[in-house]
Image (cartoon, rainbow, N blue to C red):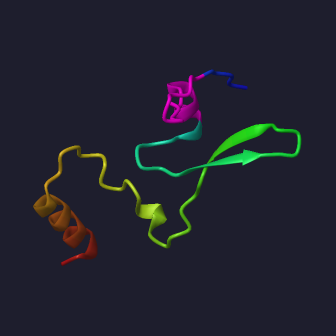
């Protein structure tokens, strides 16, 4: 179990501790859900994208700084064009 604390800003924002982000595999741009049960216990969950393209998310992240031309070339190569 991971237990971490965070402070809420005047704007109601919270920074999710790095250990929690790592455990949930959260990345910039991910969507999270806050769940609160009847006893007032809260949970934070990663919202799984149900898109048919979700499994390809981040596929080209390996090469940081890829240009649009390199990405198009990579996709065409995978498709056999």
Specify the principal SS of the magenta part. Answer: loop
Residue 46: x and y in percent read 59, 48
**Residue 78 lies in the magenta stretch:** no
Residue 38 as seen in the image, left or right of residue 25: right
Check the image and name the residue furthest to the front: 10
Residue 29: x and y in percent read 42, 49
- The mark tally for this picture is 0
Above-or-below relation of 5 to 48: above
Residue 76 as seen in the image, left or right of residue 19: left
Please name the residue shown 24% across and 68% down the image.
75
Check the image and name the residue furthest to the bottom: 81
The magenta region covers 6-23
Please name the residue shown 59% across and 55% down the image.
47
Please name the residue shown 20% across and 72% down the image.
76
Please name the residue shown 50% across and 29% down the image.
10
Residue 35: x and y in percent read 72, 47
Check the image and name the residue furthest to the right: 39
Above-or-below relation of 16 to 5: below
User: In the rendered view of the protein, which quadrant contains the N terminus?
Assistant: top right
**Residue 13 lies in the magenta stretch:** yes
Residue 53 lies in quadrant: bottom left
Of residue 59 and residue 81, the one placed in the foreground of this image is: 59
Residue 69 lies in quadrant: bottom left
Of residue 41 and residue 58, the one placed in the foreground of this image is: 41
User: In the rendered view of the protein, which quadrant contains the C terminus?
Assistant: bottom left
């Amino acid at each position: 179990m991971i237990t971490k604390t965070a402070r809420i800003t005047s704007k109601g924002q919270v920074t999710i501790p790095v250990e929690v982000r790592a455990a949930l595999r959260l990345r910039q741009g991910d969507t999270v859900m806050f769940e609160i049960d009847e006893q007032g216990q809260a949970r934070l969950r990663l919202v799984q994208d149900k898109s048919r393209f979700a499994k390809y998310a981040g596929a080209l992240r390996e090469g940081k700084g890829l240009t649009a031309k390199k990405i198009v070339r990579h996709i065409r190569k995978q498709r056999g064009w």
